[in-house]
Amino acid sequence: MSRQESHPVEDFLFTYYPHRPAHLRRWHPGFGTTLEGPSAREYLAFRGYTETPAGIAVAAPPPARREFLEWLRAMLAATAARPPFFGCHGLHEWAMVYRTDWVRHTGHPLRLEPEEIAKAVESLPVRCSHYDAYRFFTPPARPLNRLCPSRETTPELEQPGCLHANMDLYKWCYKLAPWCPSELTADSFELARDIRAIDMRASPYDFSALGYEPIRIEIPAGRSDYEQHQRRFAERAAPLRQRLIGLCESLLAEIPAE
């Protein structure tokens, strides 16, 4: 920030995900845990905390949160139940610069010529299932995608092999603050950071000056390398997703039925 430079991995975690570093650093015990001692009273200054006979704890969610919690639980459960798909090869970043002169990461060169990028997008199947990646496709790239994701179809299309779906576990954690324990938020943040690094390495940009060696998905060896990363991320994401589902169920159990 002091040099007024944008970092494609680290900045993304606080711009695309608008959760301030100060909020990420703030520790929350999570729903169902009571804090004791004089220092626990400091938490009464934060939203969602209440004093109980046993100490300071996060209060049950208000009824207004029921709709979101039900939607999130259903979406996460549906995602977890689907077989993972590992054949997208990270082409979403390529589709964002397909047949256009505009680039997102100014200051970092593309490592291929525009025609080479277009050839890769046109010759490989574009199968992006994640709306928040698809919505940044250039207009000429959108018809090439085998799916047409929308915000409304997210519960029907999210799948556990998708890098963006697994990155978004961090988003669901901070949206559930202060009920979500910080350990789960931190684990999800770490996963999102690692995924973003692979996302950028597999992009058509050259970030080698920042220490990110390219994963050349335009060739078979690069696509195989990318898929192996996808599989490892899916394995790391699965228990985090299940913990979020369990948290949603615990919170919903505390909201009185209408």
Image: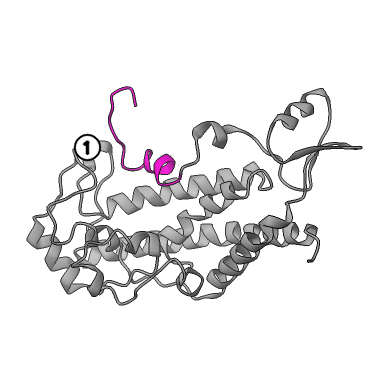
> Which residue is more in the foreground, 228 or 103?
103
> What secondary structure characterizes most of the magenta part?
loop
Position of the C terminus, as image quadrant, is: bottom right
Position of the N terminus, as image quadrant, is: top left
Asked if the stretch drawn in magenta spans residue 100, the answer is no
In the image, the segment drawn in magenta is: 1-17
- Tell me: 256 left or right of 192: right
- Measured as percent of width and height from the top left, residue 238 is found at 56, 62
At 28% across and 27% down in the image, what residue appears? 4
Compared with 37, 209 (above or below) is below
Instruction: Using the rendered view, name the quadrant where residue 163 is placed.
Output: bottom left
> Which residue is more in the foreground, 96 or 183?
96
Compared with 256, 145 (above or below) is below
- Tell me: 124 left or right of 86: left
- Measured as percent of width and height from the top left, residue 214 is found at 24, 50
- Tell me: 216 left or right of 46: left
At 92% across and 37% down in the image, what residue appears? 53
Q: Amino acid at mark 1?
A: Ala
- Measured as percent of width and height from the top left, residue 193 is found at 43, 45
Residue 120 seen in this snapshot: yes
- Measured as percent of width and height from the top left, residue 233 is found at 46, 58
Which residue is disc 1 drawn over? 209
Q: Name the image colouring.
A: one colour
Compared with 232, 147 (above or below) is below
At 13% across and 64% down in the image, what residue appears? 118
Disc 1 crowd rating (10 Å Cα; few below 14, some 14-19, many 20+) is few
Instruction: Using the rendered view, name the quadrant where residue 147 is placed.
Output: bottom left
Asked if the stretch drawn in magenta spans residue 5, the answer is yes
User: Farthest residue in the right direction?
Assistant: 53
